[in-house]
Image (tube, rainbow, N blue to C red):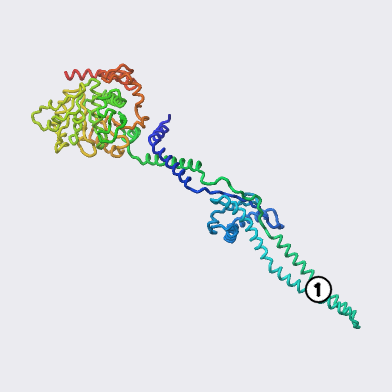
Amino acid sequence: MDDSLRKYLSILWHWAWLIGLAVVLAGGAAYMTDRLTPPVYSASTKLLVNEAPKLADAASILINDARLGQTYSDMMVQRPVLDRVIDTLGLNLSAGQLAGAVRVEIVRDTQLLRLTVESEDPAQAAAIANTIPAVFRQLNADMQAQRYADAKASLTEQLAVAADQITAKQDAIDLVARSVAPQKEADLLRLQSDLAQLRQVYDRLSASYENIRLAESQSASNIVISEPATVPTAPVRPQTSRDTMMGAALGLLLALGMVFLIEYLDNTIRSPEQVVTGLNLPVIGLIMQAAGARDRGDRALQSTAGTELIALQEPRSPITEAYRALRTNIQIAGVDQPIRTLLVTSPSPNEGKSTVAANLAIVMAQAGREVILLDADLRRPRIAKLFDQHDAVGLAATLLDDTRQWQKVLMPTKMDHLRTAPGGEPPPNPSELLGTKRMQEFVGFLKEHSDTIVIDSPPLLPVTDALVLAPQVDGVIVVVEYGSTQLRPAQQAVTQLKQAGARVLGVVLNKVPSSRRGYGYGYNYYRHYYADYSGDGRGSGHGTDTPGGARQPRSVMSGSLMAKMRTRRADDVKLRQ
């Protein structure tokens, strides 16, 4: 699997609880909102726009149709139409409220309009959808009729005058026809000529009136209901299933965005890759956080039995195997330059350095080496408490004693080949005391009585104690806490060590959550590989023997490295003799 993909999957697995919680909360909120929202029904009516016939080209007709449809769609939601609909149906709504519930849209490439009405009452929605077109059609007809009303009234008046004149002329002709006047024939001819002219005027007025009526009927564009609205049976919203799924999907997207934003902004060390690229040091140890452990400073690394010395209490634990892997990496680093004095420190307090030093000393003693665990953290000594050695003399008192009776500071433990040199009561000037020549002489005394000295020192950034000791030891390992140690302080601590001339062997990434098993050595592998491990430094499983009989995976050390280590081990024994 690609490393980037594995990293992303690890991030998702680590934040799975947050992602799941966001999905459940968002989906639940959408569900409850829909359950509390009244259902809304939608009724639609399709309307056909009948435009008045005009003589025009096809392009003009299309443009006019589009404009007329848009005009009607706007006019049907205007106040005059809505007010009459409210009066007609007796609705308990204002024109503004009704306008918000009505939507008119043009059906593309047709002369159809779709009028949609939404209401919490399905019958009311259908009634409004069918009433609006009827009211609009009547108002439109009234408006068109108003355009020709004046012309028709004028022509009607002129027709009435012409009719009266014709009647008067006809009466005059009848009167002359009954008379015996000598110019009777001439009067009749004149009156009949006038009557003919009046009738021609009347015919022209009648023709004009009919033309106006025809123009009125031809110019009246109108709408026809092509598909009336029916009473809806199902609400258009809320759609509980759809909204719940959409809410859950939105919660998922927000959670993913939040997770990756947190990971992007997080400057804490969370992977071996960050150590290698950010500190330019190898990761020589990866210690998993025990199940049920809580953040209690240096006591964060808890075994299921409730002790910090997990290498002593649970020798077959995967975490103990991680300490053995750390021991092996230190042994490999000391093939060419022997490491007899090893300083364990950390950038800041509460990162687990004392626990790492203690368990590392135990697994080294399990390998058969004579190990002394020196507590040089004179500000906050922890080794005596870890090994229940409350009556110990202590390093500070020993260094201040001029008698050089240094043997009394060494305390036995329950572990063979392992002794401790507790810190004792904190002195007022730890840095100056650790930098004295007497401290160097004391370390030399410890070398004469051991194979390896593991020194627990104070954190690097708060005080300078570790920087005083670092140049005097054969190697330094830096303990950083997963998800807690900031990258920049760690860089500053490593820089200080290098400037002091220390030999930094590498970094131990401590308290790695079990959800991040993709990093490092793989604890499921250890659990399977060391199923038959006896816990006393000797076993019957697969692997190769290290000095002292401890078993290590074959993939960790090659045969040539093992040969070098055995040779160096024999040389050390001769020197002690």
- Looking at the picture, tell me which residue is in the foreground, 505 or 113: 113
Image quarter (top left, top right, bottom left or bottom right) of the N terminus: top left
Quadrant of the image containing the C terminus: top left
| Residue at figure coordinates x 55%, y 51% from the top left | 121
Sort mark 1 into few (<14), some (14-19) or many (20+) by Cα contacts within 10 Å.
some
Q: From the viewer's perspective, tell me whether residue 9 is left or right of residue 353.
A: right
The residue that disc 1 covers is: 198
Q: Quadrant of residue 296?
A: top left
Q: Position of residue 249 (x, y in %)?
A: 46, 40
Answer above or below: position of 140 versus 125: below
Q: Quadrant of residue 549?
A: top left
- Vertical position of residue 398 compared to residue 168: above or below: above
Question: Residue 368: x percent and y percent?
Answer: 23, 20
In this rendering, the answer to whether 109 lies above or below 369 is below
Please state which of residues 282 and 28 is positioned toward the viewer in this rendering: 28
Please indicate whether residue 95 sits to the left or right of residue 519 in the image: right
Element carrying mark 1: helix
Among all residues in the image, which is located at the extreme top? 540
Outermost residue to the bottom? 182
Q: Position of residue 119 (x, y in %)?
A: 55, 51
In the image, residue 566 above or below residue 497: above
Residue at the left extreme of this rendering: 403
For the image, the number of numbered tags is 1
The answer to whether residue 283 of the structure is visible from this angle is no
Specify whether residue 379 is in view. yes
**Observer-nearest of 444 and 388:** 388
The spot of residue 61 in percent (x, y) is 68, 55
Q: Amino acid at mark 1?
A: Leu
Say which residue appears at 55% left-offset and 56% top-offset: 99
Along the line of sight, which residue is nearer the eye, 54 or 475?
Answer: 54
